[in-house]
Amino acid sequence: MTTTSRPDVAVIGAGVVGLGVAWRAVQRGLRVVVLERAALGQPDGAASPVAAGMLAPVSEADVGERALLDLGLRAAAAWPAFSAELGDDVGYRTCGTLLVARGADEAAALEREQALRESLGLHAERLLPSAARRLEPALAPHVRAALHVADDHAADPRRLHAALRTAALAAGVEIHTGADVTRLAREGTRATGVVLADGTTIEAGQVVVAAGAWSGTELGLPQDARVPVRPVKGQILRLRDPDGPGLLDRVLRFEGGYVVPRGDGRYVLGATMEERGFDTTVTAGGVYELLRDAIDLVPGIDELVIEETAVGFRPGVPDNTPILGRSAQVDGLVWATGHHRNGILLASITGDLVADVLTGTAAEVPA
Ligand code: GLY
């Protein structure tokens, strides 16, 4: 593999995070090379092409995750300009989200969810089942309670990924696929580039690790310089309505899953949350549970065509909050990882935040 000249930045990983960082860094005048271990289009469990694309800081809000919530709200606010700047249609839909409950236990859990959102100053409107069904007539009659989150939307991660790749290449980013980085090249405590599996060394002024669920691998770093990123397996189905759009307009969330409409008759039904390392198997139990719950809530899903089953690995971290910014141990090493369930949402701001660190405009990513 040859690069045209010694880049200012080598980015490990060509998912939406790595490409977003590379694009923004080139826009700031840096020379950037992106190194992606997978061959183009080869499914390997990377999160970007598998993700459903919910832009849902309010629906995802959880106890003790204020920093993540604030980051998510900023990212959601940045999405309209982000998608407009990319130019290509990235499937950004301002569709809103319905959280629905069946039975007394789920209804009580939904009440707690609403109380949490109120305590955080977030807007989520309680709906009677009849009102929820007026919004989404395909809902089953036994829906017992619903919350309407009007500000949580969706985008198409595959279109986003393609658009970021196009934008990055047009801006001058060099992208190499099949480039498997095994470790950082270092001089003392400074990262000086990366070493590939074939022995090639690529020198670079700074190195960004945006390797998703693989960011916690050794990379030749001592234990205390690594990040605690682990794969959180998600099984997902891609469905298509032969009759076209109309079954669901909004994102639907329920205990154990969600359905994300693309607006053109395609739907993503996800997702399991499994701690099974890098296990890429699609299981009967995983698919069964997703379909069982979705069909119970929206009987019309029964008629949809299954176009794809897939597994993606979320880059999980202990506090669910991304790790963005300089390594405290290795000079010239910058992390852009740990986006867990929010990679597509946070794509709208991660590139800018990390590029500001790379150029020295910001000493660190603001909390
Ligand atoms: N963002 C939803 C998921 O990770 O399943």
Image (cartoon, rainbow, N blue to C red):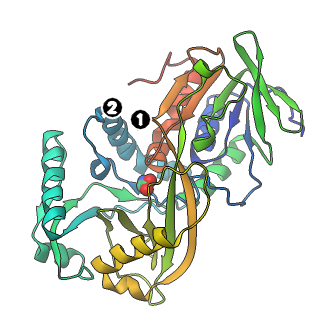
- Measured from the top left, where is residue 243 in percent x and y? 44, 90
Name the residue that disc number 2 marks: 67
Where's residue 267, x and y in %? 45, 73
Report the image quarter containing ligand 1.
bottom left
Residue 189 in view here: yes
Q: Residues within 10 Å of mark 2 (few under 14, many from 20)?
A: few
Mark 1 and mark 2 in contact? Answer it, CB < 8 Å: yes
Does residue 252 sit above or below 74 in this rendering?
below
Relative to 71, residue 360 above or below: above
- For label 1, the SS is loop
- Residue 34: numbered disc: none
Q: Nearer the viewer, residue 96 or 120?
A: 120
Closest to the observer, 54 or 290: 290
Q: Please name the residue shown 74% across and 51% down the image.
A: 38
Rendering coords of residue 28 (x, y %)? 62, 29
Residue shown at the point (16%, 70%) measured from the top left: 103
Q: Look at the picture and state if 261 lies above or below 167.
A: below
Q: Looking at numbered disc 1 in the image, what kind of residue is underneath it? A: Thr
- Residue 11, horizontal then vertical, whole percent: 68, 34
Which element carries disc 2, helix, strand or loop? helix
The quarter in which the N terminus is drawn is top right
Q: Quadrant of residue 281?
A: bottom right
Ligand 1 within 8 Å, label 1 CB: no
Residue 321's label in the rendered image is 1
Question: Is residue 128 shown left or right of residue 335?
Answer: left
As rendered, which of 234 and 165 lies closer to the eye? 234
Which residue type does callout 2 highlight?
Answer: Ala
